[in-house]
C-alpha cells in the first residue's frame, strides 16, 4: 500500500468514505465535540428511520471500534491517520460503559439487518466486503468479552 493509500485508510471497516470522513472529524475535534460525536453516532443508528444510510452506519461502526479499541488496539488498524486517532482517543472518555456496550451491540445488529439498510445493500457488493464483515464479527466478539 502506498503512503497516500495508507493515509486514506484501508479496506474493511474504515474503507467507506463516510467512515473515513467521520474518523478525520473525530481526530480534529475538541474533547467536547468528539464526545458528542460518539454519542450521536450511536444514537443515529439506533433511532434510524426508514433506512440506514452509509453516513449513519459507518459513523456508528467507527464509534464501536473506538469504544472497544482499549481492549484490542488493532481494531483501529486501517483507519486514516491511525496514530493521530490513537493520540486523540487517549484524551477522550471512551470507556465502554454498560449503556455504551448495549448501544454498540444494537449498532452491530442493526448494521447487519438487511431490511431498510441501504448501507448494507451497497457495502456487501464491494470487493472488500469479506474484510468488512470480519471486522464487524471481531467487534461483536470484543463486545461479548467486555
Image (cartoon, helix red, strand yellow):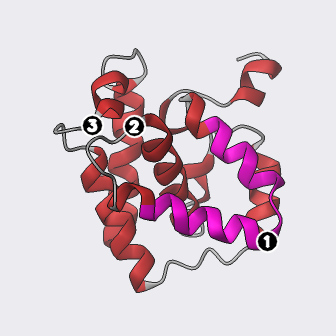
Which residue is located at x 43 percent, y 57 percent? Answer: 44
User: Is residue 105 shown left or right of residue 131?
Assistant: left
Mark with earlier residue (2, 1): 1
Q: Secondary structure at mark 1?
A: helix
- Residue 15, visible in the rendered structure: yes
- Mark 1 surroundings within 10 Å by alpha-carbon count, few (fewer than 14), some (14 through 19), many (20 or more): some
Which residue is located at x 33 percent, y 74 percent? Answer: 102
Q: Is residue 118 above or below residue 59?
A: above
Mark with earlier residue (3, 2): 2
Labelled disc at residue 11: none
User: How far is disc 1 from disc 3 in space, using C-alphas?
Assistant: 31 Å
User: How far is disc 2 from disc 1 in space, using C-alphas?
Assistant: 26 Å
User: Is residue 133 shown left or right of residue 96?
Assistant: left
- In the rendered structure, which segment of residues is drawn in magenta? 20-43
Q: Is residue 64 above or below residue 21?
A: below
**Disc 1 marks which residue?**
31
Amino acid at each position: 500500500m502506498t503512503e497516500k493509500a495508507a493515509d486514506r485508510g484501508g479496506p474493511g471497516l474504515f474503507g467507506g468514505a463516510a467512515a473515513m470522513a467521520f474518523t478525520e472529524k473525530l481526530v480534529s475535534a475538541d474533547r467536547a465535540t468528539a464526545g458528542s460525536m460518539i454519542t450521536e453516532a450511536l444514537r443515529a443508528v439506533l433511532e434510524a428511520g426508514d433506512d440506514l444510510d452509509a453516513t449513519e452506519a459507518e459513523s456508528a461502526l467507527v464509534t464501536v471500534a473506538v469504544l472497544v479499541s482499549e481492549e484490542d488496539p488493532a481494531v483501529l488498524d486501517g483507519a486514516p491517520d491511525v496514530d493521530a486517532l490513537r493520540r486523540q482517543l487517549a484524551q477522550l472518555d471512551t470507556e465502554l460503559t454498560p449503556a455504551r456496550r448495549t448501544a454498540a451491540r444494537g449498532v452491530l445488529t442493526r448494521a447487519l439487518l438487511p431490511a431498510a439498510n441501504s448501507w448494507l445493500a451497497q457495502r456487501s457488493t464491494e470487493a472488500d466486503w469479506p474484510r468488512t464483515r470480519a471486522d464487524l464479527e471481531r467487534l461483536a466478539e470484543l463486545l461479548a468479552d467486555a
